[in-house]
Structure formats: C-alpha cells, structure tokens
Image: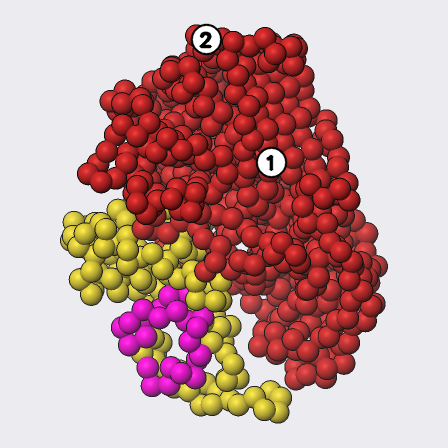
Amino acid sequence: MTRTLAPLVGAALDRVDGARKVAGAAPYPNDVRYPDLAYAALVRATISAGRVSGIETEGAEGAPGVLTVITHLTAPRLSRGPATSIGPQPTPPLQGDRVDYDGQYLAVVVAGTREQAVAAADLVEVRYEVDEPVLRTEDPRAEREENPWHFDTTRGDPAGALRTAEVRVDSTYTTPHLTNNPLGPFTTVARWDGDDLTVHDSTQHTANTRSALAGVFGIPEERVRVLAPFVGGGFGAGLRSWPHVTVAAMAARVVGRPVALELTRPEMFTGTGGRPSTVQRIRLGSTVDGRLVAIDHHAEYPAAMDDAVRYRVTPRGAGAYACPNFAARDVQVRLNVPPTGHMRAPGTAEGLFALECALDELAFRLDIDPVDLRLRNVAEVDPENGRPWTTTGLRECYRVGAERFGWYGRSPAPCSMRDGHRMVGYGMAGVTFGWTMMPCRAAATLHPDGTATIATSATDIGTGTYTILTQLAADLLDLPPDWVRVELGDTRLPKAPAAGGSGLTAAVTNAVQDACRNLLEIVRNGHPRGTDVRAEGASAPPEREDVAPSGAFAAVFAEVRVDPDLGELRVVRLVTAVDGGRIMNPKLAASQIIGGTVGGLGMALMERTTPDPGSGRIMNANLGDYLVPVHADVPDVDVLFVGGPDPLTPMGVKGVGEVGVVGVAPAVANAVHHATGRRLRALPLTVENLL
Amino acid sequence: MGPGVREPTTTVTVNGARLVANLDARVTLLDALRDRFGLTGTKKGCDQGTCGSCTVLVDGRRVLSCLTLFAQCDGRQVTTIEGLADHPLRAAFIKHDAFQCGYCTPGQIVSAAALIREGRAGRDEDIREYMSGNLCRCGAYPRILAAIREVASGAHA
C-alpha cells in the first residue's frame, strides 16, 4: 500500500446510513413482515422460586385466532448451543417445571394477530408450588462461588502493606442492578423452510445467535441464517442469545408459519440480562505523599440460579495504578434473579466507581489534589506483567481534560464554592479500560462498474460501523465513499465477532484492510474484465510477549450544583478526554463518548432496577418507573481526543464504545463530596441521600 | 375475528392518503400504521406511553400512537415520519449526528417538527424541556438539541 490512510479515515463523514434512519426506513427486526406472519405472546412466571404444578391452556387454545399454545409439557426437547467467550448459552426455555426467577417463560401463545395472541396469553392459568426464594447475597442459604472465572489476583503482600501503610482508606461501595433498556424491544422473527431456519434478530453478535440456534435444534450452522442489518440499540443486551430467540424459532416450527416474537418493555427487564448489583469493599494504603502501597478490592454480586456469565468487577491490574501490592477478588452469589448479562462497560463501570471514589477519599485525607494523586500513581507499565503499554495517553487525558474544564480554578475544600444559593462541586475520575480483540473476517468485492462492496457479519448497533468501513475502503481502494457499499448483519457474510467489549472496530477494520489489500493484489496481477473480483481478509489479536496492549484511557471532569435545602442534584457540565487510539471518524467517535457519558449519568443519578424485597419481582419494569436520562437531565458534554494510533495493530484502533461510561459516576459522586462534604458510597445519588 | 371483538369502520387520512379499514377494535394507531399499513417508520419502544418513539401528529398535535386506538382516529389527519420527507430536521439530524441506533429518531423528528411549528424551540432550555418525552438511550441528546436549535433558528437554510 502506498496510500497512508487519508483523506477519509479520520474525517468527520456523516453517517452513511443516516438518510435511512431519519426517514424511518432502516429495517429493524420488528419491521420485518411476511404475508403469513403469526404473532407470539409470552406467559411468564409470577413467582421467583418453585415449580409449575399445573398449567391450563384450554381457554387460550380456544380463543379466536390462536394457532398453538406451547408449554413445558408440549415443547420439543432442546439442547444447548456451544459456550462462547462470555460463558455458556442461557438455559433453553420450556424444558421443565422448575421456576428459578420471576419473569421466566412458562408458555408461548401464537395467533394470527398480535391482539389475539396477547389476549389469549392472559387466559393461560398457571398453578405453582412456591418455594422461599433466595433474594439477597447475605442470605445464608445462598450459594457463594469464589473466584468464579479465575480472574482473582494477588501481587506482593497487600495485607502486610495495608497494616504498615501510613494512611489507609477502608470503604464499602454499592451499585444497583441496572437494565440496559435499548429503545428497540428485542424481537425475533423466525421462519423455517424445511430444516433451514432464517431469523431476524435483535443481536449484537449474529454468529452467536446462529451457533446458539443450531445447537438448540441440533442442525448444522449452515442451515441457520441470522439477519440483523439494523438493531435498535443493545448496550450489551444483545451479546447473548436469550431464551425468547429460541421460543420464537420453536413456535415457528410448531405452527409451520413465520412467527414474530417482540418482547414487551417489562419483558426486557427479565429477559435480556443487565448489570448485576454489587457490594464492594475497597482498602487503599498510601504513603503520606500519596504513593499507593496497597489496593485490596473485594466484590460480591448476584448470578442467576441456572446460569453463568463470565464477569469481573474488580478491575484488572488494580485499575492500572502503579501499586506494588494488590489483591482483587470476585464472588458470585446464586440468587433467584433473572439471568444477568452485560451492560456497557460490564464490571468495569461498577469496579472503577468504587476505586475512583476511594482514591478521592484518599486525596481528601492527604490534602492532595485528586488529579495530582492519580498522576503520582500512573502505571507506566502493566502492573500485572511489567510490560510497557503499547500507548500511554492517560497523563495526556488528565492534562488536556483538566485544562479544558478549568480544574485548577477549583477551591479544594468541600463546601467552599457557591453559585448563589447552590453549592458547587468539581469532581473527576480516571479510566484505564481493558483491551479486547477477537478474530474477524471480511470480504471486499470490486464490481465491473468500479464500485466496491465490503461485507462482514458484524452488526452496527449505532456505533457507526457502516460509516467507518466505508471511509476505510474508499481510502484503500481509492474510490469516492458513495462508490463503496457496506453489507453487515448477515451470517452468510464472513464471520465477525460481537459488537461488544469495545473490540469490534479494531477487529473489523484490520480485517477489511487485509481484504482490500488482498483485493488490490488480485487486481494488480490482472483479472478478467467484466466480472466481480472478490477477496477475503482476516484479523486476529496479535500475540505479543514484549508489550501490554492498552485499551482506551480517559479522564472525566464533572461540575455539579446541589440545592442545600432540597438536596436537588444537577450535573451542569461534563468534560471527557479520551485516548482511543486512531479515531476513524471524530464525529461518530464523539457520539460514542457523549452517549457513554449519558449512560454514566443515568448510572450516577437515577437508574436502579428495584425488586420487591419479599417476592423478588421487579417493581419498576417499565420506562416510567425505571428512570433514564431525558433531554432535560443532560448538560453540555465536551469530548476531547488525545493520543494517536496504537502500534499494536495495523489500523491503530482501540475502540471507544464503553470508555465514556466508566468515569462519570465516580466523577459526579466526587463532585458531590466537594460540593457538600458528603461522601455518598451508594449509587444512584438520589435526593433522599442529600437532604 | 372472534365473538365480542368489534371491527368499527374507521376512515383516516395518513400523510395525505385516505385510508378506510375495519380493524379489531383493540388495534392501536401504532399497530395499525405498522402492521396493517406498512408504515414502519413509526417505532414501538415501550407500548406504554413512556418513551416517545411512537410519536405521530394527529390533526397537527403530537400524540403517542401506542396509547391511541386506531378507531379513535376516525375522520382525523395523521402525519408520520414518512410524511415529513422534506423537513429540514432530517438533514440537520444527519449533519449533527443526532442519533446512533436510529430507533428513537422518527419520534424525535416528529416531536421536534411540532415543537418548532408551535414556536416553542426558541431557547435551549425550552427544547430540552419540551423534548423530554422522547427518550434516546444512545444518549444523543446534546446533538439532537443542536439539530433542533439549528432548524428552529433558520440557520439551516
């Protein structure tokens, strides 16, 4: 290649799928229509533990338009698909009488219209033998699994270092159960043609849905096609193939017609995972001049009874602070809760909330500026293995972010700044995010008319994959961007990993670069005129012993106002500086950070999935009672990118999908302490805690 | 249809086209648009009137189509995102990258179009307040604000 990634890569190109989205013409899974489409409605458990002792379906079966009612007594026997990098597949639905959580699917009703299906589902009557559910991690009956995924780490002598440390912090932080709530209700439209299954699915990982369904029904993967060209958001909810996907495919097979199963908003709270609640004890030891000598971080959080999700709350390498002695321990506790999953920056957002707030406590104790404290402890090498980072933009994030925010105009003492009657607080947090990359394939095709097509099974859940691949291919093939067409979200295309873990952009851009290079090689060697020329390419995570791959770094700065009489908390300004490696498109990358920041604001201020303490049923399973940020909650968000391409991969991309979330809640909580002198250690930071 | 479910004759003008249908009386305006008339640009986000994704204009006023029965719209004029093909908000949303997944976008644009026409989009705080019924889980709010502000001020022309 002679061209060096210019001029389109790095340019603020408008989203290439924008015109379809603003017209309402982008086809999401629930927009798919077949002439003989039938509709499914679910019947869910209303207890958290026990068994189904009887289920009456005659009323529903006799209701107008009903095609079938399937229960555990009538459902075909299913297997379980293969495990993935994030753990085993969820338990197949309708396979037994056991109830492990409120909201578990007990039956599905299929009818000619959605109104008929919903009405008939109400007629299914379920009787239970009820057990006493295990709902709290401190319940002595709860099964505890220590070090469930073998991430626990101990380096040096944290206990000894804590004992002899000149200054210590010992605090317990809690974060609530959160629900992803993408605005597009998850939908599966399934259609069988003999033994061939086609599903339109709200997924972030088409290849996973395919292998999950092939495993469930015992058919070869080649017979399953999964389509997800557009998805109404995911934020991690679409990383697993949830039971409703299987129910839809099962129902379509039973009725011999295509079936649409659209989850209702309440079903989204129990059927698509979420961020588990956590209780975290964190202990820091430091010298009087602010050098960390010990970090001990212990986290406990729920997992569902018959499920397992690879998860980690305590941050890797003690959050990448240079500390010679550290320990990190995770404990999963089995409860009668809906299956947990992943929500944007899973684990990291919870773990760094505790760590970054504890560091603020330490800075306050030591009377050291919070930015300076972090600068004194930046890990110049990966604390887990001593290898140098591939890039080190963290110091630059602190410097640029603090400058833009006007951090050093802060009066350090709590309660010392005012805006009229309101107390003013400045707070900040640092973020070292994990690095992820999975193997990926892509194809590039040059057509006789001079246009090109890039194809891969990856989904664009709103991150901008269509656009950045257009930019990249246009540069590499020397074409105008509107001569490049990008096809995504179809398992017939070369296999790509999940849109998750902030890892897709690195994987897919490197694969497309390889495909374009291979295509140009064929073209240069001469090819028959008038035919398509197609080449595939691949990428894989580099295996390097000499360096530590660095994920994105960030520094977040927040300004809050607190009404001293009413306790009302408003976040009035947020600045985030990010080292995201090469930024493919600054407009779209900034949208990722702004969006992450808004998600972090929800975590900080309002979001909490609330179970009834007696029954375990989620009491606020709708968007009226589960509060998410609205227009009026969101202040100006300033995003700055620092650093440059990461030398680890040819494209130099790190991924910016999640890093924007992580620092917001601790920055806001630390700002609240600065404003009020009150240290709130439980999210969300609601008004009753500030009165 | 089964016994007991009425199928009233309903005449509605949707984006200028007169439609007559006899639908199950339980069918909402949202489901009629999406399932019966193929107008899937209007989105279902909650079906409970809490998210704004299904916002359409009925006789020029913003309405949550998930909480409106189709039969209630007899004789009314309905405008959906498909009917706002030439609205400058569409280009402004693209220019300001005022969406990510795009699912809430039709509802945001329909709401904003009404807001601007009502003259309530003059100040940022008004836009933020009056648009607060339209959730965006991708968190594009600052960019939606910028797009609406630009169109409301006439700066897009």
Chain B pictured colour: yellow
Considering the numbered disc 2 on the image, is that residue within a helix, a strand or a loop? loop
User: Closer to us: mark 2 or mark 1?
Assistant: 2
Q: Is residue A567 above or below residue A151?
A: below
What stretch of residues is rendered in magenta? B53-76
Where does residue A344 sit, x and y in percent of width and height?
Answer: 52, 40
Q: Amino acid at mark 2?
A: Val
- Residue B19: which numbered mark, if any? none
Where does residue A294 sit, x and y in percent of width and height?
Answer: 57, 14
The chain in red:
A
Residue B74 is covered by the magenta coloring:
yes
The answer to whether residue A443 is seen in the rendering is no
Mark 2 neighbour density, 10 Å: few (under 14) some (14–19) many (20 or more): some
Q: Amino acid at mark 1?
A: Val
Mark 1 neighbour density, 10 Å: few (under 14) some (14–19) many (20 or more): many
Where does residue A600 sit, x and y in percent of width and height?
Answer: 44, 39
Observer-nearest residue: A242 or A97?
A: A97
The residue at the point 72 percent across, 29 percent down is: A147
The residue at the point 55 percent across, 37 percent down is: A174
Q: Which residue is mark 1?
A: A279
Q: Is residue A458 above or below residue A54?
A: above
Chain of the residue under label 2: A
Observer-nearest residue: A396 or A98?
A: A98
Chain of the residue under label 1: A
Observer-nearest residue: A435 or B19?
A: A435
Are the residues under badges 2 and 1 in a single subunit?
A: yes
Q: Quadrant of residue A404?
A: top left
Q: Quadrant of residue B135?
A: bottom left
Q: Which residue is mark 2?
A: A288
Q: Quadrant of the C terminus of chain A?
A: top left
The residue at the point 30 percent across, 45 percent down is: A565
